[in-house]
């Protein structure tokens, strides 16, 4: 999902401004292991769900419904929705990717 990539790229830039440049593998380790990034895991898990073999995954309808619920920015919502709301205001790349994702979801089952 391009949206996930835009979010990760934006967050990496912010991380590197604060902590200095890091190797891609170190940043990936941070994303996976550090609890400070746990807010991003619902979107990552959703992408894994879409990529899972058809026999092992939820129905397309269920995955799209989950995506629609998750991609609602809300300053009072889940940790993902809270951070997502901020990113939409801070990053033109995330805002654009959000628009593309929402348009695709409107065409989905």
Image (cartoon, helix red, strand yellow):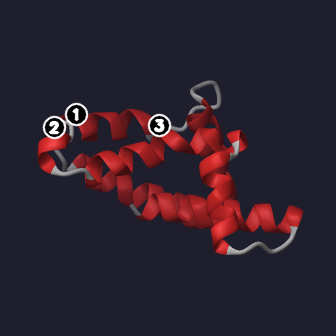
Q: CA distance from mark 1 to mark 3?
A: 16 Å
Q: Nearer the viewer, residue 73 or 34?
A: 34
**Which image quarter: residue 103?**
bottom left
For the question of whether residue 91 can be seen, the reply is: no
Q: Secondary structure at mark 1?
A: helix
Q: CA distance from mark 2 to mark 3?
A: 21 Å
Residue situated furthest left in the rendering: 55
Q: Residues within 10 Å of mark 3 (few under 14, many from 20)?
A: some
Q: Quadrant of the C terminus?
A: top left
Asked whether the residues under the numbered discs 2 and 1 touch, taking CB atoms below 8 Å apart as contact, a structural biologist would say: yes
**Which residue matches tag 2?**
59
Relative to 24, 52 lies left or right: left
Task: Work out whether mark 1 precedes mark 3 in sequence or the reverse, and give the earlier one.
Answer: 1
**Residue 57 location (% of width, % of height):** 21, 41
Residue 67 lies, with reference to residue 103, above or below; the image says: above
- Residue 72's tag is 3
**Which image quarter: residue 83?**
top right
**Residue 81 location (% of width, % of height):** 56, 36
Q: Secondary structure at mark 2?
A: loop
- Residue 62's tag is 1
Q: Residue at x 69, y 55 (%)?
A: 30
Relative to 41, 61 lies left or right: left
The total number of labels drawn is 3
């Amino acid at each position: 999902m391009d949206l996930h990539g835009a979010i990760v790229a934006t967050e990496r830039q912010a991380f590197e401004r604060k902590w200095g440049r890091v190797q891609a593998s170190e940043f990936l380790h941070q994303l996976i292991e550090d609890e400070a990034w746990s807010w991003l895991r619902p979107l990552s898990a959703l992408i894994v769900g879409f990529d899972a073999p058809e026999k092992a995954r939820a129905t397309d309808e269920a995955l799209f419904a989950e995506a629609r619920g998750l991609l609602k920015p809300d300053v009072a919502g889940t940790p993902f929705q809270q951070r997502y709301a901020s990113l939409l205001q801070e990053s033109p790349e995330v805002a654009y990717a959000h628009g593309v994702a929402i348009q695709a979801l409107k065409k989905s089952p």
